[in-house]
Image (spheres, rainbow, N blue to C red):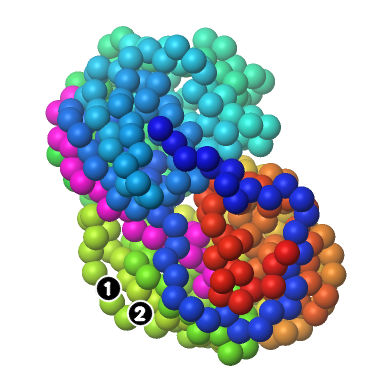
Amino acid sequence: MTPDPGSHAVTRPVTARRSGPLRGQIRAPGDKSVSHRALIFGLLACGTTEIAGLLEGADVLATARACAALGAKVDRLGEGRWRVEGVGVGALLAPTDTLDFGNSGTGARLMMGVVAGHPVTARFDGDASLRKRPMKRVLDPLALVGARVLESAEGGRLPLVLQGAREPLPVTYETPVPSAQVKSAVLLAGLAAPGETTVIEREATRDHTESMLAYFGADVRVVPEGAHGRRITLIGRPELRPAPVRVPADPSSAAFPLVAALLLKGSKLAIEGVMANPLRNGLVVTLREMGARIEVLDERREGGELVEDLVVQFSELAGVEVPAERAPSMIDEYPILAVAAANARGVTRMRGLSELKVKESDRLAAVADMLRAAGVEAQIEGDDLIVEGKGPGGVPGGGTVVTHMDHRIAMSGLVLGLATDAGMAVDDVAFIATSFPDFLPLMAGLGAEIG
């Protein structure tokens, strides 16, 4: 069913050295958030869903296996091309084996929502990193739906056994933290409940689940709530109809070659088909405020999502203050933004980063440690990260980045090394395969000195 997710995995330390200009034209891997959801909605639709551009990283492949374990027929037709024959809402099969999500918090949490609304019991597990990540934020609202945790590690962490509800209840739930995963889990559970399920979020988060619900035929309404929030209401028990999905390029993955091009003199890079969803474009907005030369060539819609082609050129960046309310639109991009800030003139302060503490690692601490290892002053004040920029070409480097099994820290550390005098070693890049399997060969093809 699935290709080998480790085809480009490297388990030895890797060093990135100061590089010349990056030049070329690329397409980043398919968006990870959309890829997970395309498979899940393929499972829940009655009939055959064709997917193009699916990210074939380890995280998404784990979700594909979980969909198959719950009753879907999942086939790979070619590179990025997949077919899912779904069973429909209410007709999941009980899995006979553990649903192992590896490093994927998104896959695990969204699938908990799916299981919670069905009368099946499933065991969830993952790697050492995922076992440390909090799950109660999802399990608490799913308990209101009627799901029960039969077994779990301390604090509701993985491994755990979740028993779905025999008669799922519609709920109205206000998310305590801005989290697209919590919102999505509640909505996915609500698909199997009668009546209206409502999620209220005080800060709007990425809206791929709502968009895909509507695209597959569900009755879902989204209205503003307060200054920055939204109220999402879903009518339960729809018959989801299969629909073709073209997955846009992932802005979180495109961020790494994009920032590398901004930092290396003489660089000019074209990036095709990048998702431009307003709830995902916080990094580009911030980089432009810093003085980045990022040009949009063609803005269009593909598969229900706004996409654009970008041309990126070397730029001299200046420090800025990034407001806390922007965090949900760029929560995965702060590590690479910190690399840009290290190479900017002046101070950059990134506010409201509490969610970084519960990612694949404590990303807030890991990012600060990464910058310090490169000779850049970085402080954490509460939930804020403050970076004293060294200016273009001013980062000394010479240290080692400790990744803590975090793919985004690994890629950020390599990009950082490309713009330093002494280079940077990264202790383990194997986990890059979770989101960007071809990162190393792609960067080498653009001219990056990594090896």
**Circle 1 residues within 10 Å: few <14, some 14–19, many ≥20:** some
Is 240 rendered above or below residue 443?
A: above
Q: Along the horizontal axis of the image, is 227 left or right of 285?
A: left
* Rendered image quadrant of residue 334: bottom right
* Rendered image quadrant of residue 13: bottom right
* Residue closest to the eye, 322 or 129: 129
Say which mark, if any, is on residue 296. 2
Q: Along the horizontal axis of the image, is 444 left or right of 36?
A: right
Which span is picked out in magenta? Answer: 236-258
Is 350 rendered above or below residue 94?
A: below
SS under mark 2: strand
Residue beneath label 1, please? 299
Q: Amino acid at mark 2?
A: Val
* Residue closest to the eye, 353 or 290: 290
Q: Along the horizontal axis of the image, is 358 left or right of 59?
A: right
Is residue 162 in the magenta section? no
Is residue 240 in the magenta section? yes
Label 2 close to label 1 by CB (< 8 Å): yes
Whole-number angstrom distance, CA of label 2 to CA of label 1: 7 Å
Please state the horizontal and vertical placement of residue 365, each as a whole percent of the image.
73, 53
